[in-house]
Image (tube, rainbow, N blue to C red):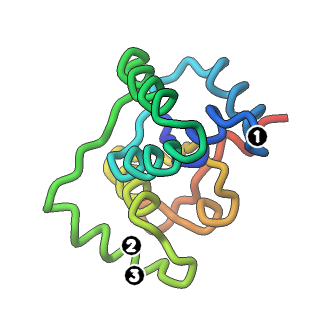
Amino acid sequence: MILVDTGAWLALLDRGDAYHTRCRKFFQHNREPLITTYPVLVECVHLMFSRIGVEKTLGWLETLRTQGVSVFAMGTEHLPSLSALMQQYADLPMDLADASLVLLADEIGEGRIVSSDERDFHAYRWKNQHPFRNLLLEQD
């Protein structure tokens, strides 16, 4: 499974985004299952309402459902881990959406991600040792 961050979803839908062409190319050619988290979805919807409007945002949510994008559900048992990650990377700082993706990588043992965030996902480590492999930045 490939993890997807907020920036990739935003860039896909916003033609004015600097990463739009790369994201569009990635999503058109990708054939592997995608997974994200509820904090990422919340962040996306909040930002998309102002960037692309309510109607396109709701259409995007429906597309996620019809395309079978998985959403990792976190519970209260994950709060200590999220808090520890956010404390560990407080100098960046790490937000909840990013912490949820690092936690997800830890849970599923997968560090391939699609993100327009070049700085943070270069610094983060899943399972405290493995670097993320940002597939979006590997494209030509």
Which of the two labelled residues, at mark 2 and mark 1, occupies the earlier sequence position? 1
Marks 3 and 2: in contact by CB < 8 Å? Answer: yes
Residue 118 located left or right of residue 53: right
Provide the residue designation for mark 3. Answer: 87
At label 1, which amino acid type do we have? Gly
Report, in whole angstroms, how far the alpha carbon at label 2 lies from the one at label 3: 5 Å
Vertical position of residue 42 compared to residue 129: above or below = above
Q: Nearer the viewer, residue 13 or 116?
A: 13
At label 3, which amino acid type do we have? Gln
Q: Which mark is residue 16?
A: 1
Indicate the quadrant where residue 31 lies: top right
Residue 48 visible somewhere in the drawing:
yes
Mark nearer the viewer, 2 or 1:
1
Q: Which mark is residue 85?
A: 2
Report, in whole angstroms, how far the alpha carbon at label 2 lies from the one at label 1: 32 Å
Vertical position of residue 133 compared to residue 33: above or below = below
Query: How far across and down, in percent of the image, does residue 130 sit?
Result: 52, 60
At label 2, which amino acid type do we have? Leu
Marks 1 and 2: in contact by CB < 8 Å? Answer: no
Element type at mark 2: helix
Q: Looking at the image, which residue is at 48% across and 82% down?
A: 90
